[in-house]
Amino acid sequence: MNVVVMLGAPGTGKGTQAPLVAKRLRIPVVATGDLFRAAARDGTTLGMEARRYMDAGQLVPDEITVRLLLDRLGRPDATHGVVLDGFPRTSIQAKALDDALAAKGERVDVAVLIDAPEEELVRRMSGRWICRAAGHPYHEVFSPPLVPGTCDLDGSELYQRADDQPETIRARMAQQLDALEDVIGHYRRSGVLRTVDGLQGIHEVAAGITRVLAEAGIHIEDAVAEHDPR
Ligand code: ADP
Ligand code: ADP
């Protein structure tokens, strides 16, 4: 089982890079933000509860988030591993994940930190469009889709997230960065943290991730060729 955790502030490129890694390892991406958005869209109790926090740019409480994540990890397609995007976001979540994996004799293999300065992140998120079907991210300037308004990967419609407004973006940053530092510390202590410079183009970041995964003993081919068909 391969468990890869993608770490980074909002907008660093986790959602862009996670599918590239997952595809090569033939395991799913599990993105808690996407799970929450789907639950909110379906109008479930958990989804409606989560939406209150999301719309305010706040983290959803750990108890709800851990329940959602562990439920997802129990599904059959996650048997051989997962690439986690957006989880864990607090030390409590990191510990809950460790405990759940340890119960199966498993552990997080590598936590990949994509590092980029805040101003760049606001720029990235203000131009972000994501697909309805799977949350694949695009950028109107940095990573436009081949056909405007349509996902290259699954053909679904692209939309801008309600919380990708400059004020909410800054609120998310302010609220999440301390917790992110805690999670980074957690994985540094367990010796699985690897850092990639996120202030490079999408292809260079992908190559950097391929390198740090190899250092952690996970060998995948370079993702560049398949990511951009142009
Ligand atoms: P995260 O999942 O970490 O919040 P995303 O992967 O959604 O971040 O990326 C945020 C925005 O920045 C998206 O619009 C994406 O297309 C764009 N983006 C991602 N990586 C890069 C990069 N290396 N350079 C420029 N833009 C990027
Ligand atoms: P971003 O990286 O831009 O914050 P996500 O799609 O990862 O976007 O998450 C959207 C929202 O969903 C977050 O602002 C937060 O409210 C909630 N969320 C996602 N993952 C978690 C988590 N692990 N813990 C708590 N809240 C979460």
Image (cartoon, grey):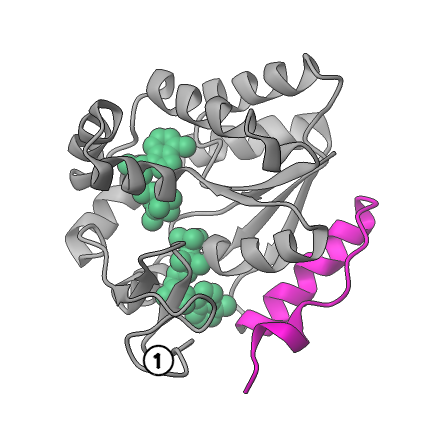
Q: Where residue 185 appears, x then y in whole percent?
A: 57, 30
217 vs 100: above or below = below
Nearer to us in this view, 157 or 170: 157
106 vs 3: above or below = above
Q: Give me the residue at 38% from left, 79% from top.
A: 144
Ligand 1 quarter of the rendering: bottom left
Element type at marker 1? loop
Screen quadrant of the N terminus: top right
Nearer to us in this view, 210 or 45: 45
For residue 35, what is the image quadrant?
Answer: top left
Q: Where residue 218 appears, x then y in whole percent?
A: 79, 48
Screen quadrant of the C terminus: bottom right
The residue lying furthest to the front in this view is 76
Q: Give me the residue at 58% from left, 45% from top.
A: 28
Label 1 sits on residue: 141
Give the residue type at disc 1.
Val
Q: Give me the residue at 31% from left, 36% from top.
A: 36
Q: Is mark 1 within 8 Å of ligand 1?
A: no
Q: Where residue 127 appears, x then y in whole percent?
A: 28, 69
121 relative position to 19: left or right:
left
Nearer to us in this view, 12 or 119: 12
Magenta span: helix, strand or loop, mainly? Answer: helix
146 relative position to 36: left or right:
right
Q: Is residue 180 magenta?
A: no
159 vs 143: above or below = above
Q: Residues within 10 Å of mark 1 (few under 14, many from 20)?
A: few
Residue 7 at least partly seen = yes
For residue 65, what is the image quadrant?
Answer: top left
Q: Tell me which segment is drawn in magenta.
A: 202-230
For residue 5, what is the image quadrant?
Answer: top right
> What is the count of numbered marks?
1
